[in-house]
Amino acid sequence: MTSGLFRRSILLAAVLAVFSATAPSPARADHCTDIANQLKQIEGLKVGITAANIIYLSHPMAKEMSLGCPNRKYSNELYVKGYKRKPKADFAAFVAGAAAIVFTVPKDELLKGVSSCLSRMGIFRGDDVSIRYRRLNMNCTRTRQDAAIAISRGIDE
């Protein structure tokens, strides 16, 4: 009689294990979408559409702005293009604040890196400058009308 009770309890445990394994798990948002929603705390920033693993953002200080989601080359990338060829300090502060949210690095340290990258563009170093700061790759470019910065972290870092 005890062996019948033992068999039923094993059968019940097996059935519960099968149901728990096949039960639907709660829906989880994409990590990149979570970061974009955290960026909403910046005043005036709006999250746009997502296309080809890139979330397009908009802000009054940026002509173009996007958040690149993880792929084979980088874990995250923030791209911001300003309206002026020589961006002001408030543009650098805005980019540093957004990058601090994306890469979880203190804003004051990122402000040093962003300012350094933007200020190096000129006659001696050219209009395309790449630096590495706090395990982040920063690439600053400028044209006749505007300047842009792309900040990314490699996939292996």
Image (spheres, rainbow, N blue to C red):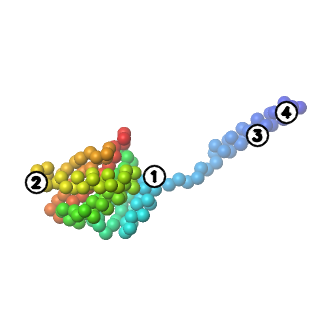
Q: In front of the other: label 1 or label 4?
A: 1
Depth check, front residue: 26 or 114: 114
Query: Does dot 4 land on a helix, a strand or a loop?
Result: helix
Query: Does dot 1 land on a helix, a strand or a loop?
Result: helix
Residues at discs 2 and 3 in contact (Cβ within 8 Å): no
Q: Which residue is mark 1?
A: 31
Choose the circle earlier in sequence order: 1 or 4. Answer: 4
Across and down, in percent, residue 17 comes to 68, 40
Q: Which residue is mark 2?
A: 123
Choose the circle earlier in sequence order: 1 or 2. Answer: 1
The crowd level at tag 4 (other Cα within 10 Å; few <14, some 14-19, many 20+) is: few
* Amino acid type, residue under disc 3 in the picture: Leu
Choose the circle earlier in sequence order: 3 or 1. Answer: 3
Indicate whether 129 appears above or below 147: above
The crowd level at tag 1 (other Cα within 10 Å; few <14, some 14-19, many 20+) is: few
Identify the residue shown where x is 58% and y is 52%.
Answer: 26
The Cα–Cα distance between marks 3 and 1, rounded to whole angstroms, is 38 Å
The Cα–Cα distance between marks 1 and 4, rounded to whole angstroms, is 49 Å
* Amino acid type, residue under disc 1 in the picture: His
Residue farthest to the front, as pictured: 108
The disc label shown at residue 4, or none: 4
Residue 98 placement: quadrant: bottom left
